[in-house]
């Protein structure tokens, strides 16, 4: 467990992106963010704002950096999602009824959401109820749902796990025909499907691998070729906790120079959103995470979690199928107390972008 000194919170903090652009606007945004989490921690919503659904535990890929592949004996072994579950439409209706406060429904989890046959009907219900609906996908199965994606999702985030057949094989363990399907699906999504609903946002994300920075350039070129206007560069999340050296830190001038060059190169073509850099010196962290105050993460068994990045739903956190007010159970109240006092925070938060 970590204990953050609250003195650090009030000290002068720089914006997450200030390594890339130290403009007045970014400092202003940082100030707003700081005030937002100060206020939210005191006057936090009495009910969740975001429903984060672990759609399925099954996947079509096996990415080596994914939390599906954490070693059980690593320090972060408890972040391995060990249950088997598929989220069901009836459970989503129950939760939307119980928590009208939910404004956004995110279909995510440690698996491929489009493997769950209830995904499209669930998205439809959420949208009909006026929620913002988003999904993160590896794109491998989108061809099963043409015509149904654009009307039901506001935001589709496509994960670029490999930009060539060889790279996809290396990172995700799948063969060349899967790469061809991936490319064909991205093209169809960006051309035909988006034509049905121009308001649907399609963006891409790529995980930074320090041993292969050029992967980011390949990702940007891929986005440019396929008309994807936004590429989010993700820092490496060290789920196993012993792999934190794979993260990019705020003193990595080589990375910062490389990314600044890339951002400039693609100006006007692809907006490259830089990753949050991990503070080398933990005393400079903001500990500005609001996840436990805003997000209800759920799986198909009913298990819950308040973290929307590294920690996973667990039986000991509570079960929304058995408890009417899981949002205020002892697990959530305990964690909110810890975040308010900034004492005894989980070790994984040290390496999480949300806490930098
Ligand atoms: C766990 S996946 C689930 C959704 C879907 N299977 C996919 O890959 O898009 C959600 C996101 O987590 C990202 N991710 C996986 N492992 C990561 C890691 N070690 N660090 C940062 N992001 C990671 C993936 O790139 C993906 O964008
Ligand atoms: S596709 Fe997504 S869930 Fe599946 S292994 Fe890769 S990162 Fe993990
Ligand atoms: S800082 Fe990250 S890992 Fe920690 S609770 Fe927030 S989202 Fe989860």
Image (cartoon, helix red, strand yellow):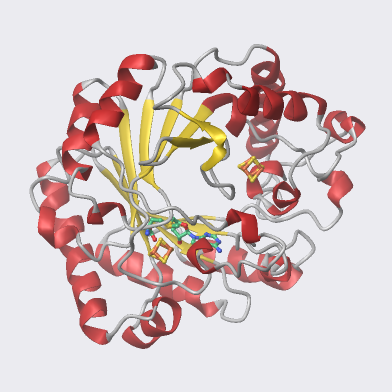
Residue furthest front as drawn: 322
> For the point 70% across and 22% down, which residue is it?
35
Residue drawn at 53 percent across, 70 percent down = 65
Task: Assign the N terminus to one quadrant of the image.
Answer: top right
Quick one: quadrant of the C terminus? top right
| Rendered location of residue 145, percent (x, y) | 12, 53
| Total numbered circles | 0
Check the image and report above or below for 222 versus 237.
below
Residue 55 location (% of width, % of height): 33, 46
**Quarter occupied by residue 74:** bottom right
Q: Position of residue 248 (x, y in %)?
A: 69, 65
Foreground residue, 176 or 229? 176
Residue placed most toward the observer, 38 or 325 = 325
Q: Residue at x 33, y 60 (%)?
A: 58
Q: Residue at x 42, y 50 (%)?
A: 109
Quarter of the view holding residue 97: top left
Quick check: 218 above or below 303? below
Q: Is residue 327 left or right of residue 350?
A: left
Horizontally, residue 192 falls left or right of residue 284, namely left
Image coords of residue 14 (percent x, y): 77, 41
Seen in the picture, residue 144 relative to 285 is either above or below; the reply is: below
Question: In this rendering, is residue 233 above or below 121?
Answer: below
């Amino acid at each position: 467990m970590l204990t953050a000194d609250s003195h650090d919170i009030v000290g002068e903090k720089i914006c997450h992106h200030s390594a890339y652009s130290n403009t007045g606007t970014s400092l202003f945004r940082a100030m707003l963010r700081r005030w937002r989490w100060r206020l939210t921690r005191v006057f936090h919503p009495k009910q969740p704002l975001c429903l984060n659904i672990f759609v399925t535990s099954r996947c079509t890929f096996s990415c080596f950096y994914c939390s599906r592949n954490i070693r059980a004996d690593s320090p972060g072994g408890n972040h391995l999602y060990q249950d088997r579950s598929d989220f069901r439409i009836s459970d989503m209706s129950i939760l939307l009824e119980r928590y009208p406060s939910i404004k956004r429904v995110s279909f995510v989890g440690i698996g491929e959401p489009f493997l769950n046959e209830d995904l499209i009907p669930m998205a439809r219900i959420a949208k009909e109820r006026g929620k913002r609906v988003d999904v993160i996908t590896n794109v491998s199965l989108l061809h099963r749902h043409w015509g149904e994606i654009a009307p039901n999702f506001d935001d589709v985030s496509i994960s670029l796990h490999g930009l060539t057949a060889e790279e996809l094989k290396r990172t995700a363990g799948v063969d060349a025909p899967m790469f061809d399907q991936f490319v064909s699906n991205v093209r169809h999504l960006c051309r035909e499907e988006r034509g049905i609903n121009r308001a649907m946002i399609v963006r891409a994300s790529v995980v930074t691998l320090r041993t292969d920075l050029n992967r980011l350039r390949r990702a940007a070129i891929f986005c440019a070729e396929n008309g994807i206007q936004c590429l989010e560069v993700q820092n490496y999340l060290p789920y196993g906790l012993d792999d934190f050296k794979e993260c990019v830190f705020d003193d990595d001038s080589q990375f910062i120079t490389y990314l600044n060059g890339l951002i400039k190169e693609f100006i006007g073509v692809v907006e490259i959103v830089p990753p949050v850099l991990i503070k080398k010196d933990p005393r400079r962290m903001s500990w500005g995470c609001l996840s436990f105050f805003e997000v209800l993460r759920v799986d198909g068994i009913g298990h819950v979690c308040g973290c929307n990045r590294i920690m996973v739903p667990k039986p000991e956190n509570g079960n929304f199928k058995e408890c009417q007010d899981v949002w205020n159970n002892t697990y959530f109240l305990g964690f909110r107390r810890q975040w308010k006092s900034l004492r005894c925070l989980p070790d994984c938060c040290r390496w999480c972008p949300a806490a930098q």
